[in-house]
Amino acid sequence: MVPREGGPTVRLVELMVRETCGSCARVAEQIAPIVGTHDARLVLVDVDSDPELAAEFGDRVPVVCIDGEEFACWEVDNAELAAELAR
């Protein structure tokens, strides 16, 4: 969770991506409206920008992490994501 200035904390949704990954772009476009509807923050993280992330995720992108915990890999169910963000 990310503290919001003057308000409650906001859920942090990180999407682990690669610049050359078409599926990553598709999932980012798919989940952005859901994340926005739940007043969460979406951050795209290029795994190739950090050797540790590149080693951890390898070819396993896109990966959605919510508040530091892995939520989904490759495919995201919109209803499940909305339910998790509503918790």
Image: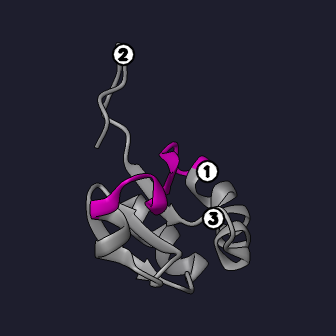
Question: Picture quarter containing residue 29?
Answer: bottom right
Quadrant in the picture for the N terminus: top left
Above or below, 1 relative to 82: above
Q: Is residue 73 magenta?
A: no
Front residue of 24/76: it is 24
Q: Secondary structure at mark 2?
A: loop
Front residue of 62/41: it is 62
The magenta-colored residue range is 36-52
Q: CA distance from mark 3 to mark 2?
A: 24 Å
Residue under the point 36% across and 54% down: 50
* Marking on residue 5: 2
- Where is residue 10 shown, x and y percent of the image? 37, 39
Q: CA distance from mark 1 to mark 2?
A: 19 Å
Q: CA distance from mark 1 to mark 3?
A: 10 Å
Q: Which residue is mark 3?
A: 31
Does 59 sit left or right of 3 as displayed?
A: right
Q: Secondary structure at mark 1?
A: helix
Above or below, 7 relative to 65: above
Q: Amino acid at mark 2?
A: Glu
Residue under the point 52% across and 51% down: 38
Does 65 sit left or right of 27 as displayed?
A: left
Q: Are marks 3 and 2 in contact (CB under 8 Å)?
A: no
Q: Which residue is mark 1?
A: 37
- Where is residue 46 shown, x and y percent of the image? 51, 56
